[in-house]
Amino acid sequence: MKHFGIATRLGLLLAAFGVLAVALTGYYTHASSARMLRAAAEDDLLTATRVVGDNMQIYLEQANRNARLLASLPAARRTLEQPGSTNGIAADVLAEVFESLLSVHSNYAQVRLIDARRHGLETVRVDRIDGTLQRIEGDALQEKAHFPYVFETLRRQPGEVYVSDIALDREDGRQTVSDLPVLRVASPVRGSDGQAAGLVVINLDVRRYFQQLRDTLPANYRVYLANHHGDILAHPDVTQTFGFDRGARVFVQDIFPPVGVLFDGQADSLIVNSAADGRTGQATAFVRLPFGDPDDGRFLVLGLSQPLNELLALFDQQRRRALELVLLFSALAVVLSALLARAVTGPVNAMAQAVTAFSRGERASRLPVKRQDELGVLARSVELMQTQITSQIDELERSRNEMDHLAHHDALTGLPNRRLFLGYLDAAIARARRSGKPFALLFVDLDRFKEINDELGHTIGDAVLRAVAERLRSHVRADDTVARLGGDEFTVLYENLETPHDAELIAAKLHESFQHPLHIGEHALQVRASIGVSLYPDHGGEATELLSSADSAMYRTKLAGRDGFHLYGEDTGHV
């Protein structure tokens, strides 16, 4: 019987060891890559869901700003306070503004001005009907005082916003598409008496918004949305939506039981895998989004779903390559298997560390992106994912900063708006209480500014407002505050007065500045102003009292013939 020698046996042993080493290396590389790739893919899906959720909140905040803006328009107040307010110049101007807003925002279905003093009668209404904008007038206008979005909005202060739940539109007599899922955003309109005289309501077409959202997502993505009760509002199968409206409620917790932790407040996001084998079915990322007034405790649950086989497509490709390597190098010796292990393990560990670091918000320092094999493809994919996510986060941060600036500054002049100015005024009152020094509040209203708009156009009118803002800034100290309240109304906050008489000197200085013409292009315009002055603490201890006193003094200047100034409470002034 022939015996094999040591060399043969050693050769067979080394060959067997080589095959085993390559097989084990391939197996563990496969398992490690599966975990990392799946974690990275799920993180990518969850990040995409968060980005979509942030976009939804930006979209809703934009609607909130539009509602506040429309409610603050002088034409809205004048329309409500004029007899027969469904007609007239102010109503026509407001209708044109509504049409402009609807033309810009294709997912706005309707904009209305509702009169609180006439049983909630629709005063100005523009609808999007079959893709065209139509103003609804006459007998088609309806009373809406009994609807919650009307009386809930009227309970709020001017400048606040009411956001309704998302529901099917069941208003009787509606001329747009029936059973349209809508979200109503409304803001009260302040009357001359300071009370809510009515409200502006924007109806958002939720179905159209989600259609636009689906158009921007990959075709294999599915979108889910539920309210704070769990009622499904968006689902790939439309028969599952708005079950509460049909008497058969369908809850997202019943379809995806793990989502219950979002409703209990135990988590704000999670990934749900609908298949036990981890390969088939869907992977769905859910996030909890704040919604409406924080005191209401309402929120939305948004979900994005993707097939698991597509989610792990890159891993399948890598697994096939690994199998080819195992078959190719299974006959090699221990040295080659060791080299292969080092060649594979090092880059995989680097990518694992990169993914782990990025999940903690750190940027990976090194990735094997220059490799030309499958690991290089994977490294470049990870780097690309990091770059895209970082870019999206930076863009969201820029958008938040821009929204914050727009919320507190006048878009035309760049001056602080009413909201920011009132904050400055409250701070000035606090400082004055500590220091004991009085300060002056000047209310500046341009004389006959409407004539400039009517004769020279709004472009020149806007240029005049910018020039007036610059003139006011140039005639006060650097630490004084100039703000635009709206229209042709400006305010100046002048702190640290030595004596109350200094306020009259300041008013005289500003009045003198308006005696010189403004040069707007080829026009030399003589723009005059009426100025009212109030003092802290003589004319009020709160911001609203001081502003009201300065406004009253300004109107005394108007009554005295304009182009001058008055100190609140004094019969004489300079005109």
Image (cartoon, helix red, strand yellow):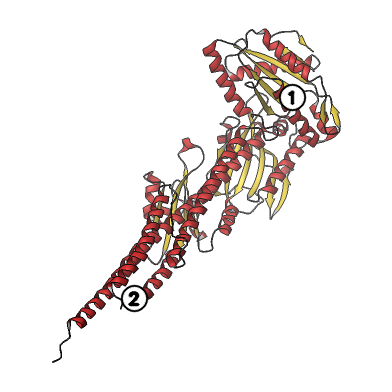
Residue 284 visible in the picture: yes
Judged from the image, the secondary structure of the residue bearing numbered disc 2 is: helix
Q: Residue at x 66, y 27 (%)?
A: 191
Q: In this orientation, which residue lies closer to the viewer: 213 or 397?
A: 397
* Mark 2–mark 1 distance (CA, rounded to whole Å): 82 Å
Q: Give amino acid for label 1.
A: Arg
- Of marks 2 and 1, the one in the foreground: 2
Q: Residue at x 76, y 19 (%)?
A: 530
Q: Residue at x 59, y 37 (%)?
A: 150
Q: Give amino acid for label 2.
A: Phe
Q: Quadrant of the C terminus?
A: top right
For residue 329, the mark is 2
Q: In this orientation, which residue lies closer to the viewer: 322 or 564?
A: 322
Coordinates of residue 13 in the picture (x, y in percent): 22, 77
Coordinates of residue 358 in the picture (x, y in percent): 42, 51
Q: Is residue 18 left or right of residue 105?
A: left
